[in-house]
Structure formats: structure tokens, C-alpha cells
């Protein structure tokens, strides 16, 4: 294994250690990841934009500061990939849509500003379903991302690009956004770690809004400790986001380092432990629980009777908010402008631009949301959905009165084939059955690798959920389970992933790019 | 356009009862905008800034940006609500009003819908003849203003027929309070005047609170007037129209009166009123139909998910209540008594919209009589001649200074009028103008005596008459002297000296 190959396989924490000890420079580490992107991203297509020059410049600045003895953050000099939903000064930000093609924002999203200030090195922007609407990244206007475990399969979505970039060793860390599972479900299908923090833990300022009351920014990584270190960087109150939590946060990295499940009460949600989940997904889920039980945790079954209505409520609240959030894309101030032949009124130009700029899934949800908010339908749809949301929150409250954390499989199946569910929106929506309740209630959730499904050899994730503001509990249980599983496996799950650097594109894959 | 028939106003009132409802938008003069850190052009400091220079990602609606409520705007809204006699909501929230328009950066307006910050108030409004009305307030809510469109090309300056339009987002996000009355019954023929007096009262309140520049010509204060008629004796309210773009006190009165006459003519012929928005045309004194409006206008309101509810602390609300200034009607009663004005004199001041100016002039040292005289007299005459407001012509401090110069004998009334013209022309303070133009009364007896002797020598017959005891003949000499002095002499002193010199003449 070459030096460069070794660098890209380090966790962020390990790389940060080497950088801190001066064993490697940030420029070297950054160049190694840029080389990896050049080598494999043609096949994976995790990135929409790679900012090699900017990354090397930022890395050199960290190296200079370190040489000058300046005080640096724990992750200073470590490269990071950024989901294209976050606006970045000087880098295009499209949210996976044609309507924003080429738009370069004049400001940084708060989480981006925070990672820059902590000395992390942004490599570029990652692919995603258009405006984060999807579970496979197939709805990206710029072509799908491929799962590094099997390039014919989906990497999950909407944040498939961030998850795949981490799984393919193109970046040790990535930022994602999770509205109904867009961080956790891609983690599940790519054998990586993804955390949706408590709603309000991380500022949404500069995150191109899908559904304001559900969106949350979070870490996408290969280890639980890396996720904790990244959450420690991006969390905290932001005066630019009224919904961000004012109180300070304890260190998540500390929670991982002290991880111990002795006496921890873990609730298994009965309604999400059914034969609607793939056999291998359930099998690895139960093996993980048994492992935790053997190490001192108490496993309890809990009920969440209203979770079954969560998807229906979600698919009213999300489109309703999205239909309003996406109204600003009208070509007047930024983005794609299409003028009908022979000119047109401003109304006609707006309509033509939106017709040409939005993809079919976006249009579907705008129409759905507009309808759900219409006079005469509001109470029946949006109003009822908000009531279900309250009931889901009540289910969580009752469950957390009995247990410290909840556990579920992260998603019903392993990665499906590209194209398999593209024409069946309802089947696609069902992917998020286990992740959506956390967004409706604002509680935090983590997905980490639980193994490979015996029937297809593809990664399976396990999800833990904690009460709002108790993100540290996720890092505790996640850190503990990761340690126990890796001891059984003899190393990280991703060590079993195919070696992409020897991969040759097949004709069909080339066509798909 | 089809010719519009109007019914005689008195006849319209015989047949129908007018019911009005008023919506007034007040732009708050906060330092920054309602939801963004950009400077607020409705604050005097930033007025007149170049287009699109007072903007941020938030008021441009850039992707990813989020609104944050301006605490100063909330406090000013609460003060206004309290001054309108409203209850202040323990918790109120914002909603999104969704519609596409290029001056609306996000294509939704953040407003308050089902939970306004202030509700259920009442305002005492006084008419010119001193009668008062209690106008019921339904609600006052916070919202953001839209940007400003300028339509270029086309004859009307409206969007229809324009070649292109320019958008200025400086105004986008300016904090607004919208005050909505309940239907106002019983004003009868006074409805147009009541509408005007109501808006004027809102302006007085806003100024006394210091929450708005409250200048109608700048759009700090905007009024939409709803008018409907119902046949005498009918219970059910008639169909209403909403007249927009009514941007002066005078036009509010005219617009309401016009709508009463227009609707009466239609109803009397058995026609139906179309529920619609109408535009007021200042030049022709008429309204024309805008877009049809119905209660089913669907703005798809829903609670703004980017903002948390506004929950003011009861202690802070109590503090703001304790700090409220005197209500305008009560203040007027007090000032009238303090100044010892007759009913007529006081109405002159109030109807001229000059109460604050007169009060400030008195505060600056002038006597009530002098302050009233200059504002309702010469300054009002100059304002009428140039079709502006007297208040905009001179500052109370300058008027007080002018009154002091007259009081001290430095200026005659006639000279003072010349000085005032200089003040209005922006030449400086009265004293500066007196110095610059050399307008002070000539109090040097030597110069006067020389002029008198010359005049007496030129008119020996007059001298003879004076010496014969026909004192009234002195007028001719006084006139000649005043002319020689270019008016800069005190006529009484000249008269004294003329009699003295005539007696002394050989």
C-alpha cells in the first residue's frame, strides 16, 4: 500500500493525530484525497464540484499556521466534502438542481463557516437528489452517484454523494443534511456512519431549505468518533437561525471515548421490527442488540403506535413547506432564466424557468404541497398531518420514559439497483419508514454499520434514537457497538468493500455516467 | 374607459348607509429591517439610498438565508398596539402568505395571520368641528414590506403594457405594522372626513411614539379604504370595494366620497357592486378597477417554520405601557386650554395639520398667539401657493426665532414676512437672513432724521399742515420716509420723529 493509499484510509481522528504530530502535512493529505477523487470519482460520481486549488490553498494555510505554532482545532488540516445543499462562498451550490446551475453564492452557510474556521479543508461539493428530494441520488439533475460497494446500486439519498465520498475514501469526513433520513439511510447502504443531530443543534443558515421544520445538518463519516468530532465543530447556537438551540452542548467526542453500555436501557420499536424489513437487515439488527445485551445493556420492547402514520404525515408537511421554500427560484435574482420564444411577461418567464429548471420529483412535490395548503384542504391535509406529528412526538415521549435510547434497523432493505424504484415514488418513499419519525419529532438519530446482509453481501445499518438534546447518548451507544463489532470483524466493515482503484468501467456503467 | 356615473352625494346618503373599513400600513423606523440585518430605508438615516444598496442575503431571498425577528420592531409594534388600546398577545406567530410577484424576493411574505401581536382596540378620532368618534380596531399585526417596482415604457406606468420593469429591493423587508379596523358604522355623511381624520390620528400616534417617520408622501403611512353601502333599513352589509394607493390625507377623503357616489349610482339602478381592489388616481380624482378580489383569494397561509413564536415578557409590555405618551385627542384638549385659543383658532391649527409645529414653536420660546399666527397665516399661504404642507416649509425653531425678532422690535411684520420667505428658500436662520439681507429695522435716529428732513423739505405744504396741528397729514411724510428706508424702519418711531422735526423746523 502506497503512502497516499494509507493516508486516505485513515479515520479523520487518526489523520488529525498524524497532522498534529507533524508526521504528515495537510497539503500531502489533501493531495492524496484529490488524487483518489481523480482516480475513482469517474466511477462513483460522488462530487459535483472539486475545488482542488482552493483545497490546497486552505491546506497550505493550515500547515503554515501549525508551523508558526498557532493554536488549531482538533480536526485542522483534515479534508472534508460538503453536500451541495449548503451554500459555499466561491464554490458553486446547486442543491442538485439545474435551476441553480453555475450559481456561486456570496456567503457561506454557518456549518461551512464553522468547518473553515476550525481549519478543515473543503474538497468540493457532493451530489444529491435535487433539493434533497429522494432516497437514491437518482433525482440529481447531474446524474446519479454509484454505491462504492456495487456500482450498479444506489448509494442512498438524498445525500448519496456525501456517503459515497466517505465510503470510497475520497474524503474522511462529509457534511450532510437530513430531512427524513438523507444522512442515515445513505450511511446504512454504504457501510458508513451518519448522524442527524437534534433539530436546532446545528444552524440551518445557508442550507438550501427543503422543509424548514424537518431539515437538520449533520456529520457523514466512517467512524463514530469522527462523527462526534465533526458534530462538536458544527453544533451550537447561531443568531442567524431562530430555531437553533441557545444552550451549549457537551462534547460528543468525550461521549464516544467514554462509551459504555452497562445498564443502558435500549428500546426496540415493535412497529419497526417486522417482516417488512429484509431478512439480512433484521438478522444483523438482532445480532447487534444481542451483542449489546451481552455487554450489559438491557433490551426492552416498546410500542410506537403512531409511527405507522408518520410517512403519510411527512409527505404532506414536507411538500407543503417545500412548495413555499422553492417559490424563490423564479429566475428574477439568481439561477436559470428561460425566456419564452418572442419574449414574455415576468410571469411567463418565471413559469418557463421553473418548468425547465425543476425535475419531475421536485414538480411532483411542489404540486402536492400547493394542494395540501390550499384553502378548503388545509385542515384535512396539512392540519391533520400536524396532529399526527404531535402524536408521533407523544410516542417518543412515552417510549423515552421507559428507555434511554431506541433502536431500529435504519432502512428496510440493502442498496437496491439503480433504476429499480425510479418509476415507483411510493416504494421510494417507504425507504424512509424508520428514519422519518425522528425528523417529525426533532429527536437525534445515528446510523452505523451492523454488518453485511448474508443474502446479498451488502452493508446494513442499525439506527439509534435519543430524546431531543441527548445526542451524547447516541455517541455513547454507537461508540460502544462499533468497538464490539469491529472486534468481532477484526477491523472496520469498509475494509471488506471492493477496491475501486482497480475497477474498470464496464460499458453499461460508462453509459450511466 | 366607460364613463362612470356618480350619484349626488346628498341623495346617495338619503338612499344608502355607508360602511367603511380602513387598513393602514405603518413603516417602522427601526435601525434594521424586520427580519434582516440590512439598514432600514424607512429610517430617516437611510432614506433615499441608491437602489439595491440596503440589502442582505435575507431580504434578497437568496437560497439558504433565514429570517430573524427584529426585537426593536417587536417593541415598537407593541407600543403602537398599546396606543391603539389593543390587547397584546401573550404569544403571537408569523405565517407565510404565498404569492408570486417579482417585488417579493421569496415569493411569499412573512406576515401574521391567525395570531397577530395586537388585537381588540379602540381609537378616539376627532372631526374638524370637534365631534369625536370611537373607531374599533380589530387587529394590528407585524409583517415585511415588498420591494419597489418601476415599470418602464408603456403609457400608464403600470405593469400592463410596460416594456420592462426595474426592481429595487431596498424596501424589501422594511418592518410594517398593518392596522385593521372593524367595519365603522354610523359615520353617515361624515364617513369621508372620518376616514381622513382616522389616518391623521394614526399618524399623530406614530409620531408621538417615535416609531415611524410617518410621512405619507414617502409611503411611511399607507391607507387602503374599504367602502360598502347598504340600503336604509337593511341589516346585511353590502359588497365592498378596497381602494388602494390613497397616499395623502386629502385623497382619503376624496376617495371614500367618490366610492360612495359611484356605488350609489350602480345600486340605485339595480346593479351589483363587484368585490374588487380599485386604484385611486390623484390627478383625476377617480378610482378604477384593479384585479378582482374575493374572499377565496388563496394565499396558502401556514405558520412560518423558520421562526419561533413571539412571546413578549409581561414586564416589558408593562414598561412599554407605562412609557406611552398622551393620546392625541386628550393632548389636543389639554393644549387648547393651555394656549387659551378659541375653538376657531384651535381648529385652524388642527385642521392645518400644524398642532405639532405650533407646540414645538411654543416650546422653542414663542408666545402661543405668535406661533399660531405665523403657522396658520403666512406659512400656510406660502404652502398653498406652492402646493405643499406648511410643516415642510420651516422648522419650529426658526419660526420661534422669527417671532422673537419681531417681539424685540428688530423686525416689523412686513420685514418678518420677507425674512420668512428667505427661511423657506433655505437661506438660513432668520437672524442669518436679517444679517445677510440687511433687513433689520433702522433704529439709527440720525439716518431717520436725515430722511425725514429731506421729505419735509420736499413737501413744504405738508410741513405747514402739521405745524397747523393737522397731525394726520404726517402720513404722507411717513410713507415717503419708509419708502426711502426700503421699509426697514419702525413706522411708529418714524411718526414720533416726524412730529418732532416738524415742530423744530424753522
Image: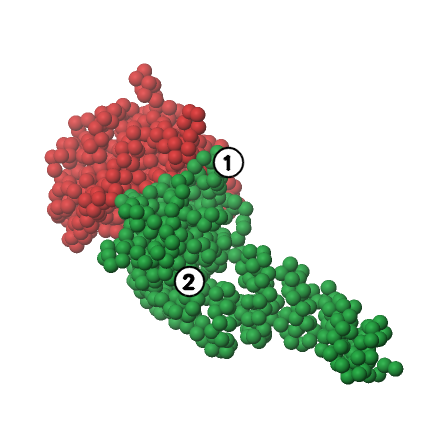
Chain colours: A red, B green
Q: Name the residue under label 1.
A: B153
Q: In which quarter of the image is residue A340?
A: top left
Q: In this view, does B272 lie to the left or right of B221?
A: left
Residue B125, above or below B240: below
Q: Which chain carries label 2?
A: B
Residue B126 percent location from the top left of the image = 40, 67
Residue A32, above or below B188: above
Q: In which quarter of the image is residue A377?
A: top left
Which one is nearer the viewer's eye here, A104 or B448? B448
CA–CA distance between discs 2 and 1?
Answer: 37 Å
**Residue in the image at 49% along x and 53% along y:** B218
Residue A228 percent location from the top left of the image = 32, 45
> Is the C terminus of chain B in the top left, top right, bottom left or bottom right quadrant?
bottom right
Which one is nearer the viewer's eye here, B414 or A274? B414
Crowding around mark 2 (Cα neighbors within 10 Å: few <14, some 14 to 19, many 20+) is many
Q: Is residue A395 visible?
A: yes
Which one is nearer the viewer's eye here, B340 or B358? B340
- Outermost residue on the top side: it is A507
Q: Which chain carries label 1?
A: B
Q: Mark 2 points at which residue?
A: B197
Residue B46 percent location from the top left of the image = 52, 53
Which one is nearer the viewer's eye here, A304 or A117? A304
Please give the count of numbered marks on the rendered protein. Answer: 2
Amino acid at each position: 500500500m502506497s503512502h497516499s493509499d494509507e493516508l486516505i484510509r485513515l479515520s479523520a481522528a487518526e489523520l488529525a493525530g498524524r497532522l498534529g504530530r507533524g508526521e504528515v502535512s495537510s497539503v500531502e493529505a489533501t493531495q492524496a484525497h484529490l488524487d483518489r477523487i481523480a482516480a475513482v470519482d469517474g466511477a462513483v460520481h460522488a462530487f459535483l464540484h472539486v475545488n482542488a486549488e482552493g483545497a490546497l490553498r486552505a491546506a497550505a494555510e493550515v500547515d503554515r499556521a501549525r508551523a508558526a505554532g498557532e493554536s488549531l482545532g482538533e480536526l485542522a488540516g483534515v479534508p472534508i466534502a460538503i453536500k451541495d445543499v449548503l451554500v459555499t462562498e466561491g464554490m458553486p451550490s446547486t442543491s442538485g438542481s439545474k435551476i441553480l446551475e453555475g450559481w456561486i453564492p456570496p456567503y457561506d452557510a454557518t456549518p461551512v463557516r464553522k468547518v473553515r474556521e476550525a481549519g478543515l479543508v473543503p474538497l468540493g461539493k457532493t451530489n444529491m437528489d435535487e433539493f434533497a428530494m429522494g432516497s437514491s441520488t437518482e433525482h440529481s439533475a447531474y446524474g446519479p452517484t454509484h454505491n462504492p460497494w456495487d456500482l450498479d446500486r444506489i448509494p442512498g439519498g438524498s445525500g448519496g454523494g456525501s456517503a459515497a465520498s466517505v465510503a470510497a475514501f475520497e474524503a474522511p469526513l462529509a457534511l450532510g443534511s437530513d430531512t427524513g433520513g438523507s444522512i442515515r439511510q445513505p450511511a446504512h447502504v454504504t457501510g458508513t456512519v451518519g448522524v442527524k443531530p437534534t433539530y436546532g443543534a446545528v444552524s440551518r443558515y445557508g442550507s438550501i431549505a427543503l422543509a424548514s421544520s424537518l431539515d437538520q445538518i449533520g456529520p457523514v463519516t466512517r467512524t463514530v468518533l469522527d462523527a462526534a468530532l465533526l458534530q462538536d465543530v458544527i453544533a451550537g447556537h447561531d443568531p442567524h437561525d431562530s430555531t437553533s438551540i441557545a444552550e451549549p452542548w457537551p462534547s460528543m467526542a468525550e461521549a464516544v471515548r467514554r462509551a459504555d453500555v452497562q445498564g443502558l436501557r435500549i428500546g426496540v420499536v415493535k412497529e419497526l421490527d417486522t417482516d417488512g424489513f429484509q431478512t439480512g437487515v433484521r438478522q444483523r439488527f438482532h445480532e447487534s442488540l444481542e451483542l449489546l445485551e451481552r455487554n450489559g445493556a438491557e433490551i426492552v420492547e416498546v410500542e410506537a403506535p403512531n409511527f405507522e402514520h408518520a410517512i403519510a404525515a411527512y409527505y404532506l408537511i414536507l411538500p407543503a413547506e417545500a412548495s413555499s421554500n422553492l417559490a424563490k427560484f423564479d429566475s428574477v435574482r439568481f439561477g436559470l432564466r428561460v425566456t419564452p420564444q418572442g419574449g414574455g411577461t415576468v410571469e411567463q418567464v418565471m413559469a418557463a424557468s421553473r418548468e425547465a429548471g425543476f425535475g419531475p420529483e421536485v414538480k411532483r412535490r411542489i404540486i402536492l404541497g400547493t394542494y395540501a395548503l390550499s384553502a378548503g384542504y388545509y385542515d384535512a391535509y396539512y392540519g391533520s398531518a400536524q396532529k399526527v406529528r404531535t402524536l408521533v412526538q407523544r410516542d417518543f415521549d412515552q417510549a423515552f420514559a421507559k428507555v434511554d435510547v431506541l433502536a431500529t434497523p435504519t432502512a428496510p432493505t440493502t442498496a437496491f439497483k439503480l433504476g429499480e424504484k425510479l418509476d415507483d415514488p411510493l416504494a421510494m418513499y417507504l425507504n424512509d419508514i424508520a428514519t422519518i419519525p425522528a425528523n417529525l419529532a426533532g429527536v437525534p438519530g445515528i446510523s452505523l454499520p451492523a454488518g453485511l446482509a448474508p443474502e446479498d453481501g451488502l452493508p446494513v445499518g442499525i439506527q439509534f434514537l435519543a430524546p431531543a438534546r441527548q445526542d451524547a447518548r447516541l455517541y455513547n451507544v454507537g461508540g460502544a457497538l462499533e468497538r464490539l463489532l469491529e472486534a468481532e470483524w477484526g477491523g472496520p466493515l469498509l475494509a471488506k468493500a471492493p477496491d475501486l482503484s482497480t475497477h474498470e468501467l464496464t460499458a453499461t456503467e460508462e453509459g450511466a455516467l | 374607459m366607460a364613463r362612470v356615473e356618480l350619484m349626488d352625494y346628498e341623495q346617495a346618503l338619503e338612499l344608502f348607509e355607508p360602511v367603511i373599513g380602513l387598513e393602514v400600513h405603518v413603516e417602522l423606523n427601526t435601525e434594521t429591517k424586520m427580519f434582516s440585518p440590512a439598514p432600514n430605508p424607512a429610517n430617516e438615516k437611510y432614506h433615499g439610498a441608491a437602489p439595491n444598496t440596503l440589502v442582505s442575503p435575507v431580504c434578497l431571498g437568496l437560497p439558504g438565508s433565514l429570517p430573524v425577528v427584529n426585537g426593536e420592531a417587536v417593541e415598537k409594534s407593541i407600543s403602537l398596539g398599546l396606543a391603539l388600546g389593543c390587547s397584546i398577545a401573550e404569544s403571537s406567530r408569523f405565517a407565510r402568505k404565498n404569492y408570486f410577484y417579482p417585488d417579493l424576493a421569496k415569493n411569499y411574505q412573512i406576515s401574521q395571520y391567525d395570531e397577530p401581536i395586537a388585537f381588540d382596540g379602540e381609537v378616539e378620532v376627532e372631526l374638524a368641528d370637534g365631534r369625536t368618534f370611537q373607531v374599533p380596531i380589530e387587529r394590528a399585526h407585524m409583517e415585511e414590506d415588498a420591494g419597489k417596482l418601476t415599470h418602464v415604457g408603456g403609457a400608464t406606468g403600470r405593469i400592463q403594457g410596460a416594456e420592462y420593469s426595474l426592481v429595487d429591493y431596498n424596501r424589501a423587508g422594511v418592518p410594517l405594522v398593518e392596522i385593521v379596523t372593524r367595519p365603522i358604522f354610523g359615520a353617515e355623511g361624515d364617513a369621508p372626513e372620518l376616514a381622513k381624520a382616522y389616518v391623521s390620528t394614526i399618524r399623530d400616534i406614530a409620531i408621538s411614539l417615535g416609531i415611524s417617520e410617518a410621512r405619507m408622501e414617502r409611503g411611511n403611512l399607507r391607507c387602503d379604504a374599504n367602502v360598502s353601502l347598504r340600503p336604509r333599513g337593511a341589516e346585511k352589509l353590502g359588497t365592498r370595494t378596497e381602494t388602494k394607493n390613497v397616499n395623502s390625507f386629502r385623497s382619503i377623503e376624496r376617495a371614500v366620497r367618490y366610492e360612495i357616489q359611484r356605488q350609489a349610482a350602480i345600486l340605485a339602478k339595480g346593479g351589483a357592486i363587484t368585490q374588487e381592489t380599485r386604484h385611486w388616481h390623484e390627478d383625476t380624482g377617480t378610482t378604477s378597477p384593479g384585479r378582482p378580489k374575493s374572499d377565496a383569494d388563496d394565499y396558502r397561509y401556514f405558520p412560518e417554520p423558520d421562526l419561533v413564536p413571539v412571546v413578549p415578557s409581561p414586564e416589558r409590555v408593562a414598561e412599554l405601557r407605562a412609557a406611552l405618551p398622551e393620546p392625541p385627542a386628550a393632548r389636543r384638549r389639554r393644549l387648547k386650554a393651555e394656549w387659551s385659543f378659541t375653538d376657531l383658532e384651535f381648529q385652524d391649527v388642527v385642521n392645518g395639520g400644524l398642532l405639532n409645529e405650533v407646540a414645538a414653536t411654543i416650546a422653542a420660546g414663542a408666545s402661543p398667539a405668535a406661533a399660531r399666527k405665523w403657522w396658520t397665516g403666512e406659512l400656510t399661504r406660502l404652502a398653498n401657493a406652492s402646493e405643499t404642507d406648511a410643516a415642510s416649509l420651516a422648522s419650529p425653531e426658526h419660526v420661534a426665532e422669527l417671532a422673537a425678532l419681531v417681539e424685540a422690535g428688530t423686525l416689523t411684520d412686513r420685514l418678518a414676512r420677507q425674512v420668512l420667505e428667505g427661511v423657506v428658500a433655505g437661506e438660513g436662520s432668520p437672524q442669518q437672513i436679517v444679517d445677510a439681507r440687511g433687513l433689520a429695522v433702522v433704529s439709527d435716529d440720525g439716518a431717520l432724521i436725515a430722511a425725514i428732513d429731506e421729505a419735509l423739505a420736499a413737501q413744504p405744504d405738508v410741513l405747514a399742515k402739521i405745524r397747523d396741528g393737522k397731525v394726520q397729514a404726517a402720513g404722507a411724510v411717513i410713507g415717503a420716509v419708509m419708502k426711502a428706508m426700503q421699509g426697514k424702519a419702525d413706522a411708529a418711531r418714524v411718526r414720533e420723529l416726524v412730529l418732532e422735526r416738524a415742530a423744530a423746523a424753522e
